[in-house]
Amino acid sequence: MTAFRIAPAVADAFPDTLIAVVTATGLRGHESWPSTTTALQDLEQQLADGTWQPADETDPRIEAWHTAYRSFGTNPRRIRPSVDALGRRLTKKGTLPRINPAVDSYNTVSVQHGLPAGAFDLDHVTGDVDIRYADGTEEFTPLGEPEAVENPKPGEIIYTDTTGVLTRHWNHRDAHRTRVTEDSTHVAFVLETLHTTRDGHLLKAAALELQGLLVPHAEQTAVYYLSPDQPQFTI
């Protein structure tokens, strides 16, 4: 069992936060995921046709994350929120990267709805997951850099378990240790908003959409929510 928790200090600083955690067990990452492939292609075609474009930093959803990053000392134009970086890449290249079906699924939902997303292979998570301010002594190994070790800045918001940091700068980059691959079978996918009052309905729709992409390729799925009013759950 794994608990997800928002630290009181983070909840107090961002009182309108809502985080959806979509879990999947018995995930089958080696088979074809046609619905994800179609969703990706449809999004890229809409961009090419000029009927849709990703949210940029002028959009209130992205602007809120820029403001949050600045509040804990991160320059969001150098170190961008994940959804901002993903949307910029899509606008520039016209395509999203193809990583594996599970990652492609949350990337598609993230950029389509303008909400940061990430995922953790729960078989490589140790203990519970906390969203809290870093003290600077924690260690982080960036995705794709298994030999590198970083320390977050004191006061930076991180996801962390009992071994180390799972994400830096709240949602800028995930850790290599808990990365999701085709072999991952027990995964927690995360979607976030800082403005439940305005965008809570959007987050919940995105969570259900992501769950829908996972259901045909998993033995079981579920959706949980974290907020200042409900700061912990256990899966």
Image: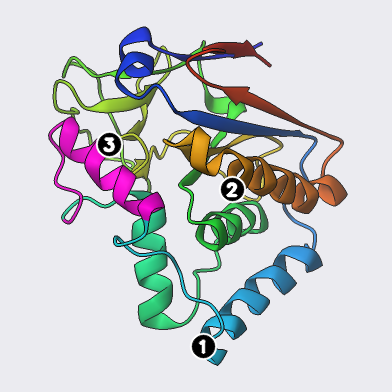
Name the spot of residue 98 as percent of width and height, x first: 55, 68
- What span is in magenta? 60-77
Image depth: mark 2 or mark 3 in front? 3
Crowd rating for badge 3 (residues with CA inside 10 Å; few <14, some 14–19, many 20+): many
The disc labelled 2 sits on which kind of residue?
Thr
Which residue corresponds to mark 3? Answer: 169
Whether 96 is drawn above or below 46: the answer is above
Residue at coordinates 18% horizontally, 27% vertically from top-left?
151
* Quarter placement of the N terminus: top right
Which residue corresponds to mark 1? Answer: 50
Q: Are marks 1 and 3 in contact (CB under 8 Å)?
A: no
* Quarter placement of the C terminus: top right
Which numbered disc flags the more N-terminal residue, 2 or 1? 1
SS at mark 2 in the image: loop
Which residue corresponds to mark 2? Answer: 181
Name the spot of residue 185 as percent of width and height, x first: 71, 37
